[in-house]
Image (cartoon, grey):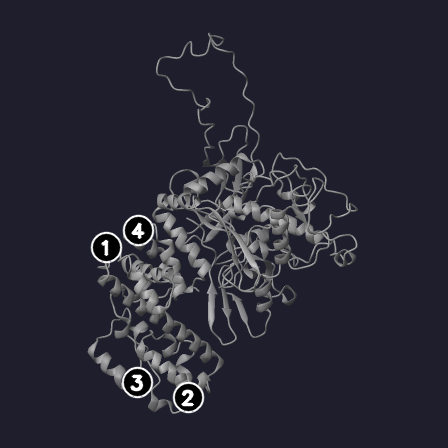
Amino acid sequence: MSSEQVLPDPGQDAADTDCPDDDAWLASIADEQPPDPEVDSWYWPETLPSDEAAGEDSELTAGLSAGGALDEALPCGALTMMAEDLAGDRDRYEGASEDELVGAVALWDRVQAYATARKLGAAAAFIRVRPDPDCELADFGDLPAVWDEFAADELAQVLAESRDGADKLLEFSHALTVKLPETLAALRAGTIRESKAWIMVCAARALDPEEARAAEQLVIGRAGRLTPGGLRAAIARAVMEVAPEKARKRREDAARDARVERWAEDSGNAALAGRELPPAAVLAIDERINAWARELKRAGLTGTMDELRARAYLDICLGQDSRPRPDSPARQNPAPDTPPAPGPAPDPAPGPDPAPGPDPAAGPDPAAGPAPVPDAAPGPGPAPAPAPDAAAASAPGGGSAPAAPADTPAAPADTPVSPAGGPLAGLIPAGFAARINLTVPLTTLLGLADRPGELSGLGPVDPALTRDLVRSAARSPESEWCLTVTDGQGHATGHGCARPGPKKPRARRAKPPPGANDPPGAHDPPGSHDPPGADHPHGPPGPGFSFTATGDQGPPGGYGTWRLATGVPGRRDLLISVDPLATDTCDHRFAAAGHNPGVKLRHLANIRHDTCTSPICRRPARQSDFEHNIPFEAGGKTCLCNGGPKCRHDHRLKQDPRWKVEQLTPALIRWTTPTGRQHTTEPTRYPI
């Protein structure tokens, strides 16, 4: 959404502000409390439906419509009672319109958040009377720093909760009161719900109260309109900006708790997951699974990509080969070898905001900056050869043995793999490497500041890990580099992709100076240091990046041409010409003549919005369609001002006649729901 939400004063009791019951009660409160022009529009709706004026249930529920009095009212006990009256017999909401029913759902969501905040307030009061005997008061919130050892047991028995669950409740209450008071105020006002408040608490665990409040300030103004996944990424980035060393230490400490967990699913199946693993390794593993899943599909195994990825996961772990046997039904009706129609894979089942990993077949997406290619240890067994689908993702310098001929008999399903084939030998390249899209603030790259980067598919990474990954990228000749210019909010306003600069002339070898053949150290004065470039006891130093202007003006209206040097010996410098990116107005310089946007236009659209442009979708843009806002067949341009990424689900939703999607400016997308409620998507906010 585009508008900022106003939060109540953390010290002000929401119950004393906007608790509508009837006109007389509201008027009496208004007489006692003079209006505050800064908060009056939030706390005191201009009109509230009264029982006398309403007469009918349909008129009572009118306040639930978009922008209505009850749609904007702060939650409290009196509002809860009014909502019960509006629900009517068996919660039928007789006479309510579709929009008013949506408003009722939103009202109860705010009431639920309000009730949670009041429960947490009671838990904080309980902590005050159950302090640990040896602790002191916390710096903020007038709470003891630690509660009594058996306090959680008291609550657990009353609530029929586990001890861990009760302890989590006390931690939740303590952290919001001491570290995150504005988050607690937003919860009480119904601006955010319990799950989002818990995301904030988890992110701030390693911070002291002052640091936590500083990180909170960076995100709380938009927390209400972010999805849980978006909020998790935003607060993680804020924590890394406020306390980069603590973020690094937390990651390193948690890595010592790396583990593999298994548990029973409610369905009767089972689950297996690795926890606290290195981010780059996880992406490499994910691509290994993707590569084998695509090979299974090519071989004729039927199923969705989720099913094929699960089968690939089992194959790799167990060393088996699930490709269909020649006489199997799946082999008799193999999947066509022709590529599918353009567009993303089917949407996964509903659940938390997905953060899919990179698509190995798509190669690197230079939109987000360098694409590091860290080494990923191959699986057990002989050195495998690359599959056709995974050839673009093979590790540099590793070689590529040809894939097995098409008429080679497939191994029986669920049998151990021999050295001749299977996911561990024969189709996935040795040292299989992930294509990682890493966004790095230039100040972090040049060592001028400690600002977090971002790994596509995983989210923010602390500055120390960002530098490690970018050094790894610099050493790989396969890495691709781009530069994105942003405004003060992190929105992209310019972009350019790097190309190799001219080769440097080879320096003529100078004659050796006198004494050059003397024994090592013969001319070294006492206490001298090794000259630049000499061997270091702990290995060669990392690449030294530099970024300088070339003096070339570059594209018209752009940001000039720049030279990026990685500092790797023998590696040519990179030249980057930065084009302007249409955000407010558009000159159609990148418009395509036909329906297909082409490589550059699609790339720039994916830079401006690096996820689907739905307000609630986080599917990566590279896995989405380029969708024309005004259809091409109806005269719409194939241009940045009339298109952007939409996942297949939201592409179909936009074509539903009950919905309306408008591209207000090249960068702002407004969605109007069937009930008339509107939500606006802003461009991606990059790390700055």
For label 1, the SS is loop
Distance of mark 1 from mark 3, alpha carbons?
42 Å
Indicate whether 246 appears above or below 97: above
Indicate whether 393 appears above or below 526: below
Q: Position of residue 580 (x, y in %)?
A: 50, 50
Looking at the picture, tell me which residue is in the foreground, 491 or 189.
189
Indicate whether 34 appears above or below 544: below
Q: Position of residue 415 (x, y in %)?
A: 69, 48
Distance of mark 3 from mark 4, alpha carbons?
43 Å
Q: Earlier in the sequence, mark 1 or mark 3?
A: 3
* Residue at 52% in and 75% down: 674
For label 4, the SS is helix
Q: Earlier in the sequence, mark 2 or mark 4?
A: 2
* Residue marked by disc 1: 138
Label 2 is placed on what type of residue? Asp
Q: Position of residue 288 (x, y in %)?
A: 60, 46
Say if residue 344 shows up in the picture.
Answer: no
Residue 22, labelled with which disc?
3
Side of 304 where 142 appears, left or right: left
Distance of mark 2 from mark 3, alpha carbons?
15 Å
Side of 289 where 256 appears, left or right: left
* Residue marked by disc 4: 211
- Front label number (1 vs 3): 1
